[in-house]
Amino acid sequence: MGREREWARHWRYAELPGLDLLRAHYVRHTFPRHAHDGYVIAAVTGGIEEVGLPGGTVRAGPGSVVLINPEVPHTARAGVPEGWAYATLYPSRELIAEVAADIGRLRGTPGFTADSVTDPQTSHTITEVHRAAEEGNALAADTLLRGAVARMLTRHAGPLSARTVRSAGAVDAAQARAVLLERMAEPPSLEQLAAELGTSPFALLRSFRERYGMPPHTWLTDARVRRARRLLDAGTPPAEAALAVGFTDQPHLNRHFTRIVGVPPGAYRRERTGG
């Protein structure tokens, strides 16, 4: 890998519904704390990726597969000066559930039980999913995708435990999240939010971090980018999407979107809409 050159392609292949694809080489790029609606299955093909997870930092090199469950907050950055390259699958919850039902090994919602595994065979298969999709070979891409997902579920998954809201703090955090989602374009301050919920700013900040793995402002930025992605998927111009989700302008969206998704919103939209 070249020491300076960065590139990335984040796209969807129409013949593989419920899946996003990212293939990239990053050197200076760092992903801030964020989470995904669905799962992450990433094959590192060069260099070292450092993934910051709730349980600690994972260093993944070639032959490794990084596994992240839905809504798990994480960061990512290069672990060596030359950066890292990887091929990533972002399967939806529905796709994972479908494969889990097919193999008949898991009841309930599946969850990965390992953050990173050494599995050169699956790592290679993931890169072949990308290659087949790029070549327009739907039969191969779908076959390889399901094989890789089934292998990971069979070897490294169990029932995904549901988070139960019990404490008053957890209830406040969930209510705060709902308010931020509803008023995303014009959110209240932390002090206003705490007052509306009948708690203190510090108590709300602590309970929100405990429940969602990041403070409310970080979570809100991630949520805005997620909603902007859905708007871009539907063909909304980036400038309109920026204002709709509460960013001040398109450069503001560009900065946060590129950091979290790994590609600029314009490039993302072009891959989705061809325009």
Image: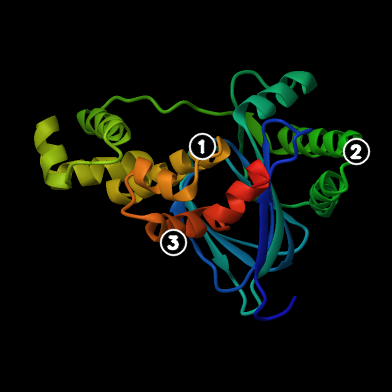
Dot 1: element: helix
Foreground of the two, 129 or 54: 129
Give the Cα separation between the discs numbered 1 and 3: 17 Å
- Tell which circle, 2 or 1, labels the residue nearer the N-terminal end: 2
Dot 2: element: helix
Q: Residues within 10 Å of mark 2 (few under 14, many from 20)?
A: some
**Residue at horizontal 37 percent and vertical 24 percent from the top:** 164
Residue bearing mark 3: 255
- Tell which circle, 1 or 3, labels the residue nearer the N-terminal end: 1
Amino acid, disc 3: Arg
Report whether residue 75 is seen: no
**Residue at horizontal 59 percent and vertical 71 percent from the top:** 79
Percent x, y for residue 151?
79, 37
Identify whether 256 is placed above or below 19. Answer: below
Foreground of the two, 15 or 41: 15
Foreground of the two, 166 or 229: 229
Residue bearing mark 1: 230
Percent x, y for residue 241?
43, 44
Residue bearing mark 2: 140
Q: How crowded is mark 3: few (under 14 residues within 10 Å), some or many (20 or more)?
A: few
Colouring: rainbow
**Residue at horizontal 48 percent and vertical 45 percent from the top:** 35
